Image (cartoon, rainbow, N blue to C red):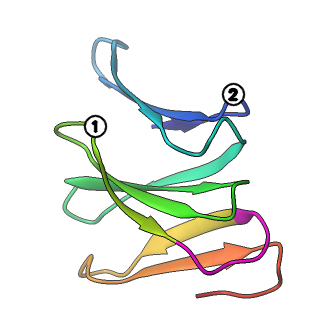
Amino acid sequence: GTASSDGTARLWNRESGEQIHVLNGHGGRIVYSISFSPNGAMVGTAGADNTARLWSVGSGQQTAVLTGHDRAVTSLSFSNDGKLVATASCDRTAR
């Protein structure tokens, strides 16, 4: 997956290079990072809109919006079992 300053994240077929999904949801603000869940069924994105978002890899649909940061969310990571997500923000907090 790729994250972009155009406000989207994109999922790609590794073998063909074909774009599979465009993940829109951060309101056109920069998407700083994208991370796959351990089982590969979900991705998380971190954005300049102060949110992290979770997406289904299969459908490309947004499944959750994680709020609570006061500034841009710059990264996120899934726990090894995929049950938890940690985020880091320019507001100097991790959640």
Q: Secondary structure at mark 2?
A: loop
From this view, report whether residue 6 is shown above or below residue 66: above
Residue 23 lies left or right of residue 32; in this view the side is: left
Instruction: State the mark number for residue 29.
Output: none
Mark 1–mark 2 Cα distance, whole angstroms, equals 17 Å
Mark positioned earlier in the residue sequence (1 or 2): 2
User: Residue 21 placed where, x, y %?
Assistant: 34, 26
Q: Amino acid at mark 2?
A: Asp
Q: Secondary structure at mark 1?
A: loop
Q: Nearer the viewer, residue 54 or 83?
A: 54
User: Residue 51 placed where, x, y %?
Assistant: 59, 64
Q: Look at the image and say whether residue 88 sits in the magenta stretch.
A: no
Residue 75 lies left or right of residue 71; in this view the side is: left
Residue located beneath label 2 in the image = 6
Q: Residue at x 37, y 14 (%)?
A: 17
Q: Amino acid at mark 1?
A: Gly
From this view, report whether residue 88 is shown above or below residue 30: below
Identify the magenta region: 67-73
User: Residue 9 placed where, x, y %?
Assistant: 52, 36
Residue 95 lies in quadrant:
bottom right
1 and 2 marks in contact (CB < 8 Å): no
Residue 2 lies left or right of residue 37; in this view the side is: right
Q: Residue at x 45, y 37 (%)?
A: 1
Residue located beneath label 1 in the image = 60
Q: Look at the image and say whether residue 72 sits in the magenta stretch.
A: yes
Q: Residue at x 56, y 33 (%)?
A: 8
